[in-house]
Image (cartoon, helix red, strand yellow):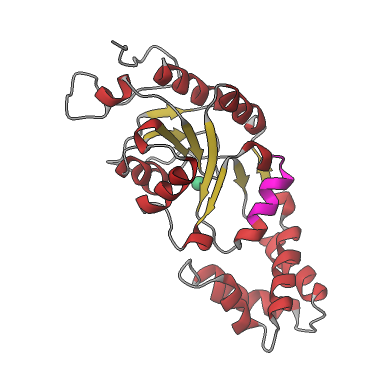
Amino acid sequence: MEEVPRDEHEGCQHKQPPEDPSNHAATLATLVVRAVLFDWNNTLVQFTWDDELLAAGHRAALRAVGRDDDPTMFTARHRERVVERGGPDEPYEALLRELLVDASDQEIDAFIDAEHDAWASAYEVLGSAQAMLESLRSRGIKTGVVLNSWPDPGRVLRRDIDRFGLADLLDVIVISSEVGMRKPDPGIFRLALDELGVDPLDAVFVGDSLATDVQGAANLGMTTIQALWFSADDTPSIEPDFMAFTPMDVLNAVSRLAR
Ligand SMILES: [Mg+2]
């Protein structure tokens, strides 16, 4: 008989009382952790918005495709159409086609690449991401990323994951725009787990968003860990199984689950 995880570890709380038979604790006690999946933005990488970079990105991108649109005017139109009114229902490429009259598909792609490159300084990878993933894999645990992409297309995000040295440490990468589902749809989590051949009950999801990461993964039966190192979501009524203030808390939670 395995022990039910307790609250003894500082900063790594088990949020549900083990005596409540209707909760997840009974399954946590006998869980075998075969996979740990992660969110991307504000979990493995931190992104900081910067108005200066919005303008710099447009200057660089217009130059890259040889357009003579006025960059200041372009940024104003972009801000109104993309930043304020845009959303995942409309691919970024389609919005840019509205803003860049007569641009070819190649020009749209080149624009996005140059713009994204200009934002490089706004992204910071979690310092211990590699060590955390290596540690999980050394225990025979599969790893992966499930991310909601917008406006960046999947190819740009895959390049980032590679640039940060994480591509070889991830067994599966599922990107919403490539599969036509977004978190919290349980289907996108299932897709990643099916690719790994892992049952949701044997899998953990780590993410900063309670509504998209924690709720979505919990609805599929995954164990959930709220990542609090980059952002502190406090959406009421959604409780993760564990809270992690550091990546070490993730490893400790997984150790306790797998005991
Ligand atoms: Mg996130």
Looking at this rendering, what residue extends furthest in the left direction? 21
Q: Position of residue 55 (x, y in %)?
A: 71, 67
Q: Is residue 160 magenta?
A: yes
Is residue 16 at all visible to an observer of this figure? no
**Horizontal placement of 157 versus 81: left or right?**
right
Q: Is residue 112 magenta?
A: no
Q: Quadrant of the C terminus?
A: top left
Magenta range: 157-165
Our reading of the magenta stretch's main secondary structure is helix
The foreground one among 108 and 27 is 27
The foreground one among 140 and 101 is 140
Q: Is residue 227 above or below residue 115?
A: above
Residue drawn at point x = 49 percent, y = 38 percent: 37
Residue drawn at point x = 54 percent, y = 25 percent: 140
Is residue 193 at all visible to an observer of this figure? yes
**Horizontal placement of 144 versus 9: left or right?**
right
Looking at this rendering, what residue extends furthest in the front direction? 197
Q: Is residue 12 above or below residue 182?
A: above
Q: Position of residue 238 (x, y in %)?
A: 31, 40
Q: Position of residue 71 (x, y in %)?
A: 74, 77
Q: Is residue 203 above or below residue 96?
A: above
Quadrant in the rendering for residue 97: bottom right
Q: Quadrant of the N terminus?
A: top left
Residue drawn at point x = 75 percent, y = 83 percent: 69
